[in-house]
C-alpha cells in the first residue's frame, strides 16, 4: 500500500534531490568551503532525515490544499444552510464580480454602480473574498500582550489542526501517511490544540481570552476520557489502531444483508463519540471557549487579521477531521457499492458535517459546569458500558 | 484563580444597548456586580424644557426605541392630564390597538435578542422576522417604521385606514402559528431549560422592594398590571385579567420571565381583537388642544417593560418647567447585583437578557 | 381603604399638611423635611405603600422640592404623591433606601442631576454622568454651551 | 552607536495616533551604511526602508501594485465586517437589516463582536461625552484598513439632541467618517445602500497593498 508520504519520499529521492544537490555542490566549489554551508545542506538532503523532511513538506502542503479546498466548501455549506434555517438567503456574491478585477487590471474603472448581477450568484466566492481580506489586514500585537506567546499560540492551534489532515486517510489509495498507531496519533494531535488556545488566552492579557482558554482546558478534561473510551470499543473489535484495519473489519460481518458497521453494535459508543467530538471541535452546543454571548469572541477576542483567518480555517478543518474520524470508526469508512471509495467517504463525511451544522443553528449553548457534569457523570459511564458491549461483541462473533 | 473584575461593556454582545456591567468573579462564579450607566445619557429631561409640549413627542419616541409608541403615549397622557384635554373615544380605542401591537413588537424584539444570549443565533432571526410584520402593520397608520410619532396630545395623528383590522388579524394569526413553533423549539428544548430553569431567581417580595415592575414582577406571580390598577384609554372597557407565571413559591427565574412574555403576547393579541371589534366611530383628535399649561400632573402606564411614569410641571408657558421620567428598567438594573450573585459568568447574558434591558429609556 | 380616608389620616400627622385627592386612588400630601423620615416609615409599615415609584427633584428657583410617588402593589393601585420642600443652600434629606430598596438609584439620580444630598444613602455617587463632571445639569442655573452652528 | 532614549510627555502622547505597540522609547534613525551595528528591530526597519526605496525607484512597486491591487481590493470591498456595536435606535435597524427581510449577509456583512476582527465601525446613535473615549478606543483597536459609517442623524451631527449638554456634535469630531447615512432612524435599505457606497469608495480610493506606507 502506497501512501502519499511514500510517494513523495520516492519523488524526493528520485527526482528532487538529484536535481537540487548538484547546484549546491557547485556552490560549495566556487566559494571557500569554510564559509559556505551549501555542501552541508546537500549532504543533509541526501541523508534519510533530510529526505524525510522534504517528503513531509510536500505531504503537508498537499494536505493543506485539500484542507483549504474543503474549508471553503464547508464554510460555504455552513453559511448557506444556516441562512436557510434562518429563513434568509446567505452570501450571494456572484462570479460576475470578478469582471471588476479584469476592469481594474485593464485600468478602466467604469462608472461604479451596483449591478444586479453582483449579488445574484451562489456565493461561494464570499469565502475567497473573506480570505483575501484577512491577508490585507494589519497584523496587530496588543500593547500589553506577551509578544512571543501571542504569536505562537495561534500557530500551535493552526499547525496541529493541519497536521490532522495528514494523518487521516481518504481511502487506501489517497492516504497521506500510514502511521502505525493510526487514529491514536490523530487523537494525540487533536488534543494539542487546547494548549494553543490556553497559550493565546493567557498571552492576550485580556480577561475574556483568559476565561476562554481556561474553559478550553477544563472542557478538555471532561470530554477527552469518554472520547477515547468510546473509541477503545472500536479498537477492541478491530484489534488495531489503523484506519485501514478498522474499515476492513467493519466489512467482515454481515447480518440480514446489512454490513455490521460499528454504528449498529456500538450505537451507544457512536452517541458518546459524536457528543465528545462536538466538544472536541468546539462547536455549539459545546463552544464554550468562544461563547459569543458572554465572552466577546472567546479566546479569539484579541487576534485579528491573518491569524484570525487561519484560526477560522483551522476550526473548520478540525470539524472536517472530526467527521472523518467518525466515518472511519463507525460508518464503515470508504466502503460502499458502485461508487469509488473516495466519493463514498466524502458523502458520509459531508453528511455528518451537515448534521453538525444543523445542530449548531438549532440548539443553544450549554454552560461550563453543565458540560463538566455531562462529561464526568453521563458520558464516562456510558462509554464504559459501551466498552463492555464491545467486549461482549468480540466474544460472541 | 484569584478574584478579578470583568467589565462587560460598553461594547459587549451581552449588553443590548450601551451600558457597562462590572462583575467580580471567583473562577467563573460571580461574587459581586455593579452596573454602570450613562453612556447614552442624552439629557432628554433638560432639553425637553427647551421644547414646546407638542415637540417633545420626538424625544419620547426615541426614549425606548423598541417600544416608541408606549412612551409617547405615556407623555401624551400626562400632558392631557395637565392641560385637561378630553380624548375622543375612537382615539382611545386606536391608542389601545397600537399600544398592544407595539407591546407585541417589543416582546418579539426581546425574544429576538434573548436567544443569542443563550447561544442560539437563529432565534434572533426568527424574532426579527416576526417583528417585521408588526412594524409593517404599525407603519400603515403612522407612516413610520420604528419611531412613529403617532400618538399626539389630544388623540392620534390619523385614523386607522379601512382594512386595517383584516390585516392585523392576518398578522396575528401568523404570529400565533409561529409562537406555537417557538414553544416547540424553546420550551421543549432540554438545553434551553437547562440554561433558564432556576437561573436568576428572585422572590416576589424582593422584587417589590427593589422596585421591579411589569413582566418581571408578574413572572413572580404578582398580578399587578397598571392597565387595570391605574386604568387608562379603552382598557376599562376590555375584558382581561393580568397574566402571571411563576417558578414556584412566588419566585421568578429566567424561564418564567420568558414564559411571561410569550403569554403576554397572546394576551395582547386578544386585547387587539377586542378593541378592534368594540371600536366606536367618531373623531380621532380632540377639538382644541391648548398650547400653554399651568400646574402639575403625572400619569403612569404599563410600558412593555414595566411601570412608566411621567411627571410634568407647567409654569404657564408653552414649554414644560420640569419633566421627569420614571423608567422601569432604571430600577430593575439597580437590582441586578442582587440576582446576579452566585451564578456563573455564562449566566450573565441569560439573566440580564431575561429582564429585557432597554438603555434608551434608562439613561434618558 | 378609600383614598380620601388615608390622606386625611396622614395629614393629621406632625409636619404633614395639604392633604388632597387628585383623582381616583391618587392622593397628594406635603411634608416638612424634619418630619419626613417618620412619615415615610409610617407610610411603609402602617399603610402598606410597598412600592417607591419615583423620586423627582424640582428646582423651584427659590428652593428645591422633592416629589415622591409611592404606590401599593395590588389591583386597586392606590398612589400617594408626597412633596417635600428643601432650602436652596442646604439641599439635604434623609435617605429612604432602607425602607424601599428601589429608591436607591432614584436618589443617586437626584444627586447626580440636581445635587440633592441624601443622608444615609449607602453609595451616593453619580449614576448617569461621568465621575469628573462639574455641576448638576438639571438645575435651572446650570449654563452650558450649545454647539450651535452659524448658518 | 549611541542609543538615546526620548521620553515624551505622557499626557501629550495620550490618545495620539494608534497605540498598537508599547514603544515607550523613541530611537533615533539608524546611521546609514553602518548596518552591522544595528539592533534587530532597527535592522528590520533598515531592511524595510531599503526594500521600499529600491522598489519605489525601480518602479517595481508600481507594477506589483497595479497587478495585485484589483485582487486585494476586490477581497476588501466584498467582505466588510462591521463591529457588533449598538448605540440607539439605528442599532435596531442594523439588526433588522441583518434579518430575513433585508439580509445583509447576502453582501458578505458578518457582525463580529471584537474590534480586532472588524473592518467597519458603524456609529449608530448619539455619542455622549462618557462614551466618546471608549468609542475612540474601539476605533483604535481595529486593524487597518478600517472604515467608519456614521449611521443616522445623531452620529452625523447630534440629531434631535443637538442642544444637549452631553451629546457630541457628530462622530466626525473625533474619528474620521467615510460614509454618512442620513435618516432618523435609518431604514435598513439605506444601510444597505451605505454599504454599497462604502464599496464604491474602497474601489476608487484604496491604494495598493504592496509595500504600503
Image: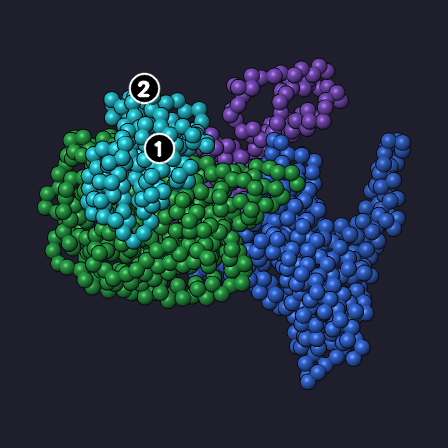
Examine the rendering and report whether any part of residue D168 can be seen. no
Instruction: Look at the numbered disc 1 and give the secondary structure of its residue.
Output: helix
* Disc on res. A392: none
Looking at the picture, how far across and down is residue D155, in whole percent?
37, 35
Looking at the picture, how far across and down is residue D36, in whole percent?
76, 22
Which residue, as the protein is rendered here, is positioned at the far left? B287
Q: What colour is chain D?
A: purple
What residue is disc 2 on?
C89
Where's the C terminus of chain D, which quadrant?
top right
Q: Quadrant of residue D172?
A: top left
Q: Nearer the viewer, residue C133 or A322?
A: C133
Structural distance between the alpha carbons of marks 1 and 2? 20 Å
Q: Chain of mark 2?
A: C
Q: Nearer the viewer, residue B285 or A277?
A: B285
Q: Quadrant of residue D59?
A: top right
Cβ atoms under marks 1 and 2 closer than 8 Å: no
Image-based side of B158 in relation to D56, left or right: left
> How many dots with numbers?
2
* Disc on res. C37: 1
Task: Give the cyan chain's letter.
Answer: C
- Judge if badges 1 and 2 mark residues of a common chain: yes
Determine the residue positioned at 18% across, 60% down: B279
Residue neighbourhood size for the residue with mark 1, other residues' Cα within 10 Å, grouped as few (<14), some (14–19), many (≥20): some
Instruction: Look at the numbered disc 2 and give the secondary structure of its residue.
Output: loop
Which residue, as the protein is rendered here, is positioned at the far bottom? A256
Residue neighbourhood size for the residue with mark 2, other residues' Cα within 10 Å, grouped as few (<14), some (14–19), many (≥20): few
Q: Chain of mark 1?
A: C
N-terminal of the pair, mark 1 or mark 2, is 1
Where's the N terminus of chain D, which quadrant?
top right
Task: Give the green chain's letter.
Answer: B
Q: Nearer the viewer, residue A93 or B344?
A: B344
Amino acid at each position: 500500500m502506497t501512501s502519499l508520504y511514500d510517494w513523495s519520499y520516492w519523488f524526493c529521492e528520485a527526482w528532487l534531490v538529484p536535481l537540487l544537490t548538484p547546484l549546491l555542490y557547485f556552490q560549495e566549489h566556487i566559494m571557500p568551503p569554510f564559509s559556505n554551508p551549501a555542501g552541508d545542506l546537500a549532504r543533509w538532503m541526501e541523508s534519510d532525515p533530510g529526505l524525510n523532511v522534504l517528503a513531509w513538506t510536500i505531504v503537508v502542503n498537499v494536505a493543506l490544499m485539500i484542507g483549504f479546498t474543503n474549508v471553503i466548501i464547508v464554510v460555504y455549506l455552513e453559511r448557506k444552510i444556516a441562512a436557510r434555517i434562518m429563513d434568509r438567503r446567505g452570501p450571494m456574491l456572484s462570479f460576475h464580480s470578478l469582471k471588476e478585477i479584469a476592469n481594474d487590471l485593464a485600468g478602466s474603472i467604469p462608472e461604479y454602480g451596483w449591478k444586479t448581477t453582483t449579488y445574484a450568484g451562489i456565493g461561494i466566492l464570499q469565502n475567497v473574498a473573506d480570505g483575501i481580506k484577512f491577508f490585507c489586514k494589519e497584523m496587530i500585537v496588543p500593547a500589553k500582550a506577551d509578544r512571543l506567546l501571542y504569536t505562537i499560540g495561534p500557530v500551535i492551534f493552526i499547525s496541529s489542526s493541519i497536521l490532522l489532515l495528514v494523518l487521516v486517510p481518504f481511502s487506501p489509495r489517497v492516504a497521506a501517511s500510514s502511521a502505525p498507531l493510526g487514529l491514536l496519533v490523530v487523537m494525540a494531535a487533536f488534543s494539542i490544540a487546547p494548549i494553543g488556545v490556553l497559550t493565546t488566552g493567557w498571552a492576550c492579557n485580556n480577561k475574556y481570552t483568559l476565561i476562554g482558554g481556561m474553559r478550553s482546558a477544563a472542557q478538555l478534561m471532561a470530554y477527552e476520557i469518554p472520547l477515547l473510551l468510546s473509541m477503545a470499543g472500536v479498537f477492541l473489535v478491530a484489534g488495531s489502531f489503523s484506519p485501514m484495519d478498522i474499515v476492513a473489519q467493519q466489512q467482515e460481518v454481515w447480518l440480514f444483508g446489512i454490513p455490521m458497521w460499528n454504528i449498529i453494535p456500538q450505537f451507544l459508543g457512536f452517541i458518546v463519540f459524536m457528543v465528545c467530538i462536538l466538544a472536541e471541535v468546539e462547536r455549539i452546543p459545546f463552544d464554550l471557549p468562544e461563547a459569543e454571548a458572554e465572552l466577546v469572541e472567546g479566546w479569539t477576542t484579541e487576534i485579528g487579521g491573518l491569524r484570525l483567518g487561519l484560526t477560522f480555517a483551522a476550526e473548520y478543518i478540525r470539524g472536517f477531521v472530526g467527521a472523518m474520524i467518525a466515518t472511519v470508526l463507525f460508518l464503515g469508512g470508504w466502503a460502499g457499492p458502485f461508487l469509488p471509495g473516495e466519493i463514498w467517504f466524502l458523502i458520509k463525511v459531508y453528511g455528518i458535517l451537515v448534521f453538525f451544522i444543523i445542530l449548531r443553528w438549532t440548539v443553544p449553548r450549554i454552560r461550563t459546569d453543565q458540560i463538566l457534569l455531562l462529561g464526568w457523570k453521563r458520558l464516562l459511564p456510558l462509554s464504559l458500558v459501551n466498552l463492555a458491549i464491545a467486549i461482549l461483541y468480540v466474544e460472541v462473533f | 484563580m484569584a478574584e478579578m473584575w470583568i467589565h462587560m461593556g460598553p461594547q459587549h454582545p451581552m449588553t443590548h444597548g450601551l451600558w457597562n456591567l462590572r462583575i467580580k468573579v471567583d473562577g467563573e462564579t460571580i461574587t459581586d456586580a455593579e452596573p454602570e450607566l450613562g453612556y447614552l445619557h442624552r439629557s432628554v429631561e433638560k432639553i425637553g424644557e427647551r421644547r414646546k409640549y407638542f415637540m417633545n413627542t420626538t424625544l419620547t419616541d426615541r426614549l425606548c426605541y423598541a417600544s416608541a409608541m408606549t412612551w409617547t403615549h405615556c407623555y401624551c397622557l400626562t400632558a392631557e392630564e395637565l392641560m385637561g384635554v378630553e380624548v375622543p373615544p375612537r382615539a382611545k380605542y386606536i391608542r389601545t390597538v397600537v399600544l398592544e401591537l407595539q407591546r407585541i413588537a417589543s416582546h418579539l424584539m426581546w425574544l429576538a435578542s434573548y436567544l443569542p444570549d443563550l447561544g442560539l443565533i437563529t432565534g434572533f432571526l426568527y424574532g426579527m422576522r416576526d417583528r417585521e410584520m408588526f412594524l409593517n402593520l404599525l407603519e400603515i397608520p403612522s407612516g413610520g417604521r420604528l419611531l412613529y410619532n403617532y400618538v399626539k396630545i389630544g388623540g392620534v395623528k390619523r385614523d386607522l385606514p379601512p382594512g386595517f383590522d383584516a390585516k392585523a388579524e392576518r398578522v396575528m394569526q401568523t404570529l400565533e402559528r409561529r409562537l406555537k413553533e417557538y414553544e416547540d423549539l424553546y420550551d421543549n428544548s432540554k438545553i434551553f431549560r437547562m440554561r433558564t430553569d432556576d437561573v436568576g431567581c428572585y422572590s416576589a417580595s424582593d422584587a417589590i422592594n427593589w422596585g421591579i415592575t411589569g413582566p418581571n414582577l408578574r413572572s413572580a406571580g404578582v398580578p399587578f398590571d397598571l392597565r387595570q390598577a391605574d386604568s387608562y384609554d379603552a382598557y376599562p372597557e376590555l375584558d382581561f385579567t393580568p397574566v402571571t407565571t411563576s417558578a414556584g413559591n412566588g419566585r421568578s427565574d429566567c424561564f418564567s420571565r420568558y414564559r411571561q412574555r410569550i403569554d403576554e403576547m397572546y394576551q395582547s393579541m386578544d386585547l387587539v381583537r377586542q378593541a378592534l371589534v368594540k371600536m366606536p366611530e367618531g373623531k380621532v383628535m380632540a377639538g382644541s388642544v391648548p398650547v400653554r399649561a399651568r400646574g402639575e400632573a403625572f400619569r403612569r402606564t404599563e410600558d412593555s417593560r414595566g411601570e412608566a411614569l411621567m411627571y410634568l410641571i407647567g409654569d404657564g408657558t408653552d414649554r414644560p418647567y420640569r419633566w421627569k421620567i420614571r423608567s422601569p428598567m432604571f430600577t430593575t438594573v439597580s437590582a441586578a447585583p442582587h440576582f446576579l450573585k452566585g451564578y456563573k459568568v455564562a449566566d450573565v447574558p441569560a439573566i440580564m437578557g431575561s429582564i429585557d434591558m432597554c438603555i434608551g429609556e434608562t439613561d434618558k | 381603604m378609600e383614598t380620601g380616608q388615608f390622606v386625611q389620616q396622614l395629614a393629621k400627622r406632625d409636619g404633614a399638611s395639604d392633604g388632597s385627592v387628585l383623582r381616583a386612588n391618587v392622593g397628594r400630601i406635603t411634608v416638612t423635611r424634619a418630619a419626613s423620615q417618620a412619615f415615610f416609615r409610617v407610610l411603609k409599615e402602617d399603610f402598606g405603600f410597598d412600592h417607591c415609584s419615583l423620586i423627582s427633584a424640582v428646582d423651584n428657583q427659590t428652593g428645591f422640592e422633592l416629589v415622591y410617588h409611592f404606590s401599593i402593589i395590588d389591583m386597586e393601585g392606590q398612589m400617594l404623591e408626597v412633596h417635600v420642600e428643601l432650602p436652596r443652600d442646604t439641599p439635604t434629606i434623609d435617605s429612604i433606601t432602607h425602607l424601599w430598596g428601589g429608591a436607591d438609584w432614584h436618589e443617586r439620580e437626584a444627586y447626580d442631576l440636581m445635587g440633592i444630598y441624601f443622608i444615609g444613602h449607602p453609595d451616593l455617587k453619580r449614576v448617569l454622568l461621568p465621575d469628573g463632571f462639574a455641576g448638576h445639569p438639571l438645575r435651572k442655573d446650570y449654563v452650558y454651551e450649545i454647539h450651535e452652528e452659524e448658518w | 552607536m549611541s542609543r538615546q532614549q526620548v521620553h515624551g510627555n505622557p499626557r501629550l502622547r495620550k490618545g495620539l495616533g494608534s497605540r498598537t505597540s508599547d514603544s515607550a522609547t523613541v530611537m533615533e534613525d539608524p546611521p546609514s551604511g553602518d548596518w552591522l551595528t544595528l539592533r534587530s528591530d532597527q535592522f528590520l526597519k533598515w531592511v524595510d526602508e531599503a526594500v521600499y526605496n529600491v522598489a519605489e525607484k525601480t518602479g517595481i512597486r508600481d507594477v506589483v501594485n497595479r497587478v495585485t491591487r484589483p485582487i486585494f481590493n476586490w477581497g476588501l470591498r466584498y467582505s466588510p465586517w462591521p463591529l457588533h456595536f449598538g448605540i440607539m435606535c439605528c442599532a435596531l435597524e442594523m439588526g433588522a437589516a441583518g434579518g430575513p427581510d433585508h439580509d445583509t449577509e447576502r453582501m458578505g456583512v458578518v457582525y463580529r463582536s471584537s474590534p480586532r476582527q472588524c473592518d467597519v465601525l458603524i456609529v449608530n446613535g448619539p455619542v455622549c461625552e462618557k462614551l466618546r473615549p471608549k468609542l475612540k478606543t474601539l476605533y483604535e483597536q481595529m486593524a487597518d484598513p478600517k472604515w467608519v459609517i456614521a449611521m443616522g442623524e445623531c452620529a452625523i451631527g447630534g440629531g434631535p439632541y443637538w442642544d444637549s449638554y452631553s451629546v457630541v456634535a457628530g462622530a466626525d469630531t473625533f474619528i474620521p467618517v467615510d460614509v454618512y447615512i442620513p435618516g432618523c432612524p435609518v431604514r435598513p435599505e439605506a444601510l444597505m445602500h451605505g454599504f454599497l457606497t462604502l464599496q464604491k469608495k474602497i474601489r476608487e480610493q484604496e491604494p495598493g497593498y504592496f509595500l504600503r506606507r
